[in-house]
Image (cartoon, rainbow, N blue to C red):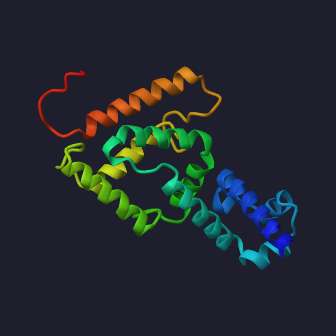
Amino acid sequence: MKDGHATRRRLLEAAAEEFARYGIAGARVDRISANAKANKAQLYAYFGDKDRLFDTVFQEHANEIVNAVPMTAHDLPAYAVGIYDTCLTKPNLVRLATWARLERVPAGELVTMPEETAQKLTAIADAQRAGHIDPALEPADVLAMVSTMALTWSPASLFYAATTSDQEADHQRRRQALAETVRRAFRPPGPPDTRE
């Protein structure tokens, strides 16, 4: 049984790499099996078919995508920077999500995790009541916009995809720009900020 668990884990890891690189349609069961040092019969026994294998891989990674950075609603800039850093160290999370959006879920919520999302929305609403976030904005919109801003330089970027091989000075510049932009975008209205 222990060997079966190890084989299943190798298949999931090889599949995650394959799907992140080629998408669902482009992924090949032969490559996944070979890279996992398993045979196709084992893959089919554990997962049924390629589509169900993707569903398993994506669900496993969806949990990591959603929970990679703890929600700090009272400090949205730090939350956004945490997402930026996660995208640098775990680019396959974004790639898998991008393929799922392109090939599976073209509209609506990509990841349905009611409990985790509800906790984040409650944290944002609490931060709004405490005067940390503009109360005129819907919490769901705040979460969506902060997350999207944090993905500006992710593997899904339409402009520039950052990697760990970029200069640290570039990462620092982006982190600072992201944090400052998020701070300005979501602060509650009031007297001009003396820091500007």
81 over 193 or under it: above or below: below
User: What's the residue at 47%, 63% (across, down)?
Assistant: 111
Q: Quadrant of the N terminus?
A: bottom right
- Percent position of residue 87, x then y: 55, 43
Closer-to-camera residue (71/182): 71
3 over 96 or under it: above or below: below
User: What's the residue at 66%, 62% (across, down)?
Assistant: 25
| Residue at the outermost left position | 191
- Percent position of residue 19, x then y: 67, 57
Closer-to-camera residue (2/30): 2
- Percent position of residue 2, x then y: 83, 71
Q: How many marks?
A: 0
- Percent position of residue 13, x then y: 73, 58
Side of 118 where 14 appears, left or right: right
Q: Quadrant of residue 112?
A: bottom left
Side of 189 where 75 appears, left or right: right
Q: Quadrant of residue 177?
A: top left
User: What's the residue at 76%, 58% (across, down)?
Assistant: 14
Q: Quadrant of the C terminus?
A: top left
Side of 34 where 194 appears, left or right: left
31 over 3 or under it: above or below: above
| Residue at the outermost front position | 130
Closer-to-camera residue (64/57): 64
